[in-house]
Every structure is written in C-alpha cells, then in structure tokens.
Amino acid sequence: MKIIAGLGNPGDKYVGTRHNIGYDVLDRIALDYKIDIHERKFKGLVGSGYIEGEKVVLVKPLTYMNLSGECIREVTDFYKIDVNEDLLIICDDINLEKGQLRLREKGSAGGHNGLKSIIAHVGDGFKRIRFGVGDRDGRIDLADHVLGHFPKEDWDIIKEGVLGAEGAVKCWITADFATAQNQYNRKKNG
C-alpha cells in the first residue's frame, strides 16, 4: 500500500494558488482513478482506491501548509507504512521552472514549510515530487507569490506538469521510484 499526499491550504480562497499545486495533482489522480477524497480524518481529507492494481491512500492535509506533518504522521501511524518506501509527498517549489518536476528519494525541506513540518514528524526519508511554480519577481513577497494564482498564460504549462506528476506517480507504482526519476526529472524545453 502507498500513501500519496498533495500539500496545500484548505479553503476556497486558496483554490488554484501556486501553493496548492499538490492538491491539484491529487485531484487529477483522484479523477482519473475514480478515488473519492472527501472523508475527513487524520486532520485531512482522505480517500482510498487502486492505481494500476496497487492499493493507495490519497491525502490532502487540512492543517494548513505549515502544519502538514501533523496530518501525515497520523496517517502513516494508522496504516503502519514504511515511510521511506511507501510515502510520497507532492508540493510546490519556487526554485524550479513552472511545470518542471523534481523527484527525490529523501532530503531537506529546501525552505518549504510544509516539508519542514513533515520532516519534523516522520523524518526526511520519504519520497517527494517537487512541482515548479516559478520564482517570484524580487519585488513580490514570497508569501504573496506562493498564495497567488498562476497567470492565464501559464495554464497550459501547469496542466502539462500536473499530467507529468500523475505519470510519475503511476511509474513509481508500476516500476519503481528510480525509473520515475529517470523519466520525469528533466528540465522543461530540454
């Protein structure tokens, strides 16, 4: 069994923001694999189903980004999974080009408060897909940037990235994470 969590903030005012791209990827996976992620438990929204024959639990923490680890810890403790093998976190990354994916087996938070919270609760050995949302203009506050919406001209790139992230999840499940890294860790336009 695999646990796949998409990070974001709950509430209508955060829908479609850069910080909620993890939620967006999870919504795409849920749609394509007919998984309902509306059950409230573990301080999040949870749904279970199958991706290519593998049992999965999809999780959207409702603790707000900075406390995501509380939800993730409750889910991983309940299902008694090996966090290093069977947990995947999907989140935004301002250090990557819009739509670019970076898959990592483990690592630091890299300044991301949601990852920082998860690391504090379960350690740093979990797998992650970091989704590029582009860096901010130096005059724009970081919080305003990540809580802002993608401009209309970026929608095609973002949709392509969401489909790529879904493909990476499927590849992890059907092959392994190293294969997913080889296929999906590449720069845009190159």
Image (spheres, rainbow, N blue to C red):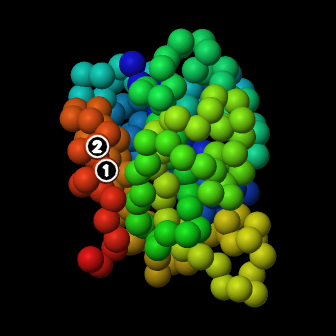
| Depicted 162 relative to depicted 7: above or below | below
State the image coordinates of residue 132 (x, y, percent, origin top left).
49, 65
Residue 162: which numbered mark, if any? Answer: none
Mark 2 and mark 1: span between their CA atoms? 5 Å
Please name whichever residue, 23 or 90, is drawn nearer the observer in this view of the structure: 90
Q: Quadrant of the C terminus?
A: bottom left
| Depicted 87 relative to depicted 115: above or below | above
Please name whichever residue, 9 or 122, is drawn nearer the observer in this view of the structure: 122
Please name whichever residue, 51 or 92, is drawn nearer the observer in this view of the structure: 92
Residue 17 falls in image quadrant: bottom right
* Residue marked by disc 1: 181
Q: Quadrant of the N terminus?
A: top left
- The residue at 70%/30% (across/down) is 121
State the image coordinates of residue 51 (x, y, percent, origin top left).
30, 29
- The residue at 50%/42% (across/down) is 106
State the image coordinates of residue 174 (x, y, percent, origin top left).
22, 33
Q: Are marks 2 and 1 in contact (CB under 8 Å)?
A: yes
Is any part of residue 37 visible from this angle? no
Tell me: 66 left or right of 178: right
* Residue marked by disc 2: 178
| Callout 2 amino acid | Ala
- The residue at 72%/40% (across/down) is 117
State the image coordinates of residue 50 (x, y, percent, origin top left).
33, 24
| Depicted 38 relative to depicted 153: above or below | above
Residue 183 falls in image quadrant: bottom left
- The residue at 49%/17% (across/down) is 81
